[in-house]
Amino acid sequence: MNLTLKIWRQNGSQDKGKMVDYQVSDISENMSFLEMMDVLNEQIINEGGEPVAFDHDCREGICGMCSMHINGEPHGPDKGITTCQLHMRSFKDGDTITIEPFRAKAFPVIKDLMVDRSSFERIQQAGGYISVNTSGNTQDANSIPIDKHAADMAMDSATCIGCGACVASCKNASAMLFVGAKVSQYALLPQGQVEAVDRVKNMVAQMDLEGFGNCTNTGACEVECPKGISLENIARLNSEFFKANVKG
Ligand code: SF4
Ligand code: FES
């Protein structure tokens, strides 16, 4: 395949940035999207240019690093996958592909396609954990009976990989789906009850502090989420937040 790539180039957070056109040829349909980007970068390096900076780590849909907005969609045109799982067979010879970073005030661009998602880390640090006494008398987690349905739902919420596609797809740049998933995975389990009130209050406060927008129930986040995190998680976040404020 021969392709035209229109890629966002931005040399640091203070740079204005612009779209730059590149041509790549002999791209196999069996290549992953990131392998195609590797081919492009090799070409740029051979021509003495600066390679395109982009994030990646596991390249198998687990780490959530590969944040690219491809042809106007976070993680590209296919559903239920991350950018690293996207293959070139989803495009055709002669296509023009637009590649931009995830855009949100709370995700400032570091360089080119790389954005700073440490705002997600700070939300997690605000409450995305349980405190366990590790003095040696810790109760074996498997000895706590958990309803199978609740365990399954908690597991579904826990599959959120923190990629940020929900934020990038939202017209308000809301992080409610991410925070909803993180709150839900504990709210559904007995282990999460002890710190439930502080958790939801602190995580929502940090979310607001980071500059994420509000949810207006558009649902784009659910459509673009590579892990199928459902809007039910936002409903649970709202109900946990309400309960926490009633309890004081
Ligand atoms: S909710 Fe989905 S889109 Fe949002 S961070 Fe988690 S995995 Fe990514
Ligand atoms: S590189 Fe890890 S999810 Fe894509």
Image (tube, rainbow, N blue to C red):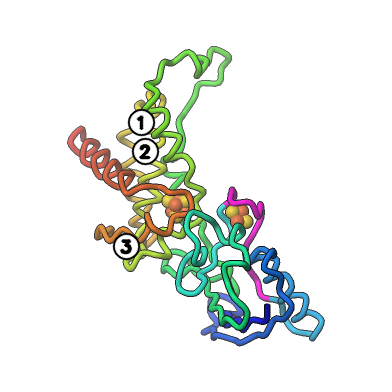
Is-magenta flag for residue 58? yes
The residue where tag 2 is placed is 184
- Residues packed near mark 1 inside 10 Å, few (<14), some (14 to 19) or many (20 plus): many
Report, in whole angstroms, how far the alpha carbon at label 2 lies from the one at label 3.
Answer: 20 Å
The residue where tag 1 is placed is 188
Specify the quadrant of the image occupied by residue 150. top left
SS at badge 1? loop
Q: What residue span does the magenta drawing correspond to? A: 52-63
Q: Which mark is residue 213?
A: 3
Could you say which is closer to the camera, residue 49 or residue 72?
Answer: 72
Specify the quadrant of the image occupied by residue 153. top left
Give the image location of residue 220, x and y in percent: 35, 61
Question: Left of 222 or right of it: where is 79?
Answer: right
- Residues packed near mark 3 inside 10 Å, few (<14), some (14 to 19) or many (20 plus): some
Give the image location of residue 85, x and y in percent: 60, 57
SS at badge 2? helix
Is-magenta flag for residue 87? no
Q: Can residue 120 be seen at all in this image of the molecule?
A: no
Give the image location of residue 69, x and y in percent: 50, 69
Give the image location of residue 147, x and y in percent: 37, 21
- Residues packed near mark 2 inside 10 Å, few (<14), some (14 to 19) or many (20 plus): many
